Image: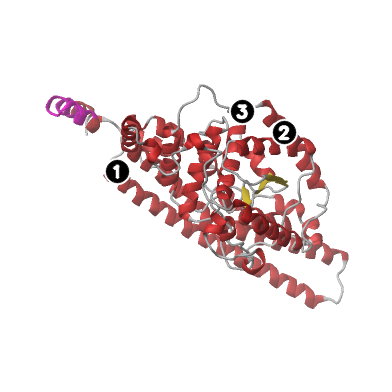
Amino acid sequence: MPVRKVTALYLILYLILPVGLAQEAARPQNDLQKIPEMSYLDILERADQLSVTAQQLGTMKERFERERKKEQDELKDHIKSLENEEKTLQKQLEEMNKQASQDTPEMAQKRKDLHCRIVKIEKDISDAKIKKDTTTQVEYENRLAKLELAQRWPSEQREIQRQLQAGTARQRQFGNVDDIGVRIIQEGQSDDIKRGQDAIKELKEMGLLPPEVDDATVKDYVTSVGQKLSLGSDLKVPLQVTLLNSEEINAFALPGGYLYINSGLILKAENESELAGVMAHEMAHVTARHSARLNKKATIANVLFQGAQLAAMIFTGGAVSSLLAYYALQYGFYGLGLAISLTLLGVSREYETEADQLGVQYLWKSGYDPKGFVTFFDKMASDKGYVRSTSFFRTHPAFADRIIHSFREITFLPSKEEYIYDTPDFHKAQDQLKKTVEEMRKTKPANAPSLRKKRIDIECEEELKQPPELMERPRLTRPPQ
């Protein structure tokens, strides 16, 4: 259409339509395209300026779903190609074994190269399967959730203001925030201590816990953050904080107040409020006794070998993430499908929502910026990592529901003049941890699992460091122009 006709058309629209409708008709879709690239906080704070209709949301959902399906199909083909390549290499080994009873130096070198190529392909297959089954879904849910937030938040915000003005805000679940520390979320926290101790004992006996970080400076710092949160929480049992040397970006709490923090989590966080946000969420599982309330006598031993994806819920199921991906990344057991029942960790859709809300409250009560919980969530959902980040997620409940529920609670909470956002101690501990982890990487962990594939790990270390081909693939396509 000629430029003059386009201009004339918009002029007519402005003259004959109500101002609001004319602006909507003339406005390009740039805003809609930009929303999935915005942070959750930006969307929540600018929701009144972002207009997303139900029709637009439906259209984008269909588009994202097609893109997700296309990427998963491509990854499926990629996996098949890698599996065929592995079969070819295995046949080459078979042919070598027919040539002579013992290897010549040349054959030995060729055999070593084949071994390392096979191990690398096994890792790439595992990575590709995780990306196909989990990462693409996380990307899809994350981008869709941001559009859904822009649509839903203005009405949610109006309802919050109505409750505040009506004086009914404290009538929401766990609305008695001024009673934190003396209120009872669930009776019997002390009854969970033995269950947590038994779980830890079994984990250690089976060699499934990553080694602890032996650095007094970092341990003291993490413990101090935990104790600060504990004083602003509903904990009725002593908090026991342990720092694990694992690249997985996660944390998990066992019944009875046993909180485990992975080194990868501290290294990924950008400030102390983000670290505190994850820790507060995990502590909420303890205070609400989510494990006991699921009413199942799950133990580490009797659920360990259930088939499952290498994934975990955000801020939850960290044992799955930490232990399984620890094996996959550090010990060469790709694609085993091991799983620890999330029941032991108190993980369910309902209880995740409770832990989100309580965790935000504990941040607020302890003086931390409660938005740190949301910013770290956003960081992980938007990360391009294929294992260390994605193992952080399983979308129960959906992203939009969790973000809205968390931000609703933040909006309900009485404002404070100042919040703890960051501290010099956090960055000092983070820098120290980087050095300690590197030193530990160079030496064999004292309590490493006994099934470690020592020779293959050592021989193929450089090959295993190389990123798989799929890592260079683009993420889900941007919203259509």
Label 1 neighbourhood size at 10 Å, few (<14), some (14-19), many (20+)? few
Q: Which residue is drawn at the image coordinates 65% and 63% (left, top)?
A: 300
| Residue lying at the far top of the rendered structure | 417
In the picture provided, is 343 more to the left or to the right than 158? right
For the stretch drawn in magenta, the main secondary structure is: helix
Which of the 4 image quadrants contains residue 105?
bottom right
Q: Which mark is residue 56?
A: 1
Mark toward the start of the polypeptide (2 vs 1) = 1
- Farthest residue toward the left? 16
Cα–Cα gap, marks 2 and 3 = 12 Å
Span shown in magenta: 8-23
Of marks 2 and 3, which one's residue comes earlier in the chain?
3
Query: Do the CB atoms of the residues marked 2 and 3 lie less than 8 Å apart?
Result: no
The total of numbered circles placed on residues is 3
Q: Is residue 396 visible?
A: no
Q: Amino acid at mark 3?
A: Asp
Q: Quarter holding the C terminus?
A: top left
Circle 2 crowding by C-alpha within 10 Å: few under 14, some 14–19, many from 20: some
Q: CA distance from mark 2 to mark 1?
A: 46 Å
List x then y, in percent, for residue 277: 57, 38
Q: What residue is shown with label 3? A: 422
